[in-house]
Amino acid sequence: MSGKKRRKKQRFREFYEEELLRLQFELVKMHHWIIEKDLRVLILFEGRDAAGKGGIIKRIIEPLIPRHVRLVALGKPTDTERSQWYYQRYIAHLPAGGEIVICDRSWYNRAGVERVMGFCTDQQYWEFLRSTPEFERMLIRSGIILIKYYLSISSEEQENRFQSRAKDPTRRWKLTPMDLEARERWVDYSIAKDIMLEHTDIPEARWYQIPGDSKRRARLNCIRHLLSLIPYEDVTPSTFELPPRSHQEEFYERPPLDKHTVLPDLYEGR
């Protein structure tokens, strides 16, 4: 990489850190507004393997109030769940008032991995495409703010990320057998995505597609767009001065430390 490109990359990285901090501060404002107005927000993230869903979700959740935001990332359905109405296990995770729920994959598994990998029947698949728009309209009529994002990524960039994961022992767990199978089925997943968007990109609940080859730009674009979808006012608590502390510690004598198991400070002086 030339020196000019390195400097440009460094400048963007510095801009990214500053802009991310600014946007996260706005997310906190929006979150306080959602809590105060008792809004219910449901955000779905779908997309290619290694497209960067987890990175975006992490940056959204990072500054928010933990008691009022939940990440839902369901595993394979149990035998009992397979016998239920398809949407049933997702309904239990819908947001309550004043809450944001973010789904790292959702009921759209049926339109993607289940369709491509043959985990559902043709009848189940086409019924899903018929039913989902009505299911989502029902959620919206109930007052839920439903937001749907799809992360796209080029086959070249996906391959780069898979190779990077394979070489990094701290990230190798991200490379599952399902990912390896998806690597061989790029066109099948593309066709499934096209059909899914054709049937479920409805006016009441649009799909917002995010180009994901640049992780940092994808994060900024997504957060900025999310902030534009929910009009909010700044109702964050105002600053205030803490009253003077009482001096009860003057009357407290701590037991000797050798009576407890205390971790040694192995980094003292560094």
Image (cartoon, rainbow, N blue to C red):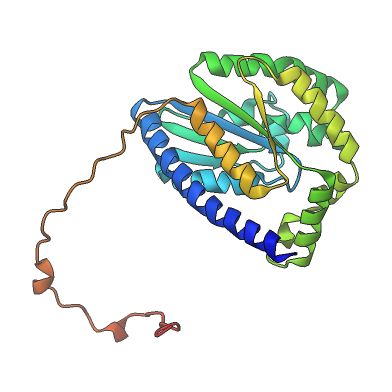
Q: Decide which of 261, 110 is in the foreground and name it.
A: 110
The quarter of the picture where the N terminus appears is bottom right
Q: Position of residue 126 (x, y in %)?
A: 81, 19
Q: Which residue is drawn at the image coordinates 71% and 20% (left, top)?
A: 200
* 35 up-or-down from 145: above or below: below
Where in the figure is residue 174, as x and y percent of width and height? 72, 55
**Residue 263: percent from left, percent from top:** 41, 80
Observer-nearest residue: 255 or 96? 96
> Is residue 118 something that shows in the picture?
no
Judge whether 173 appears above or below 117 on screen: below
Q: To which quarter of the image does residue 67 belong?
A: top left
Look at the image and tell me whether residue 69 can be seen. yes
Answer left or right for 259 relative to 110.
Answer: left
Foreground of the two, 19 or 137: 19
Query: The C terminus is located in which quarter?
Result: bottom left
Residue at image position (68%, 23%) is 85
Q: Quadrant of residue 250?
A: bottom left
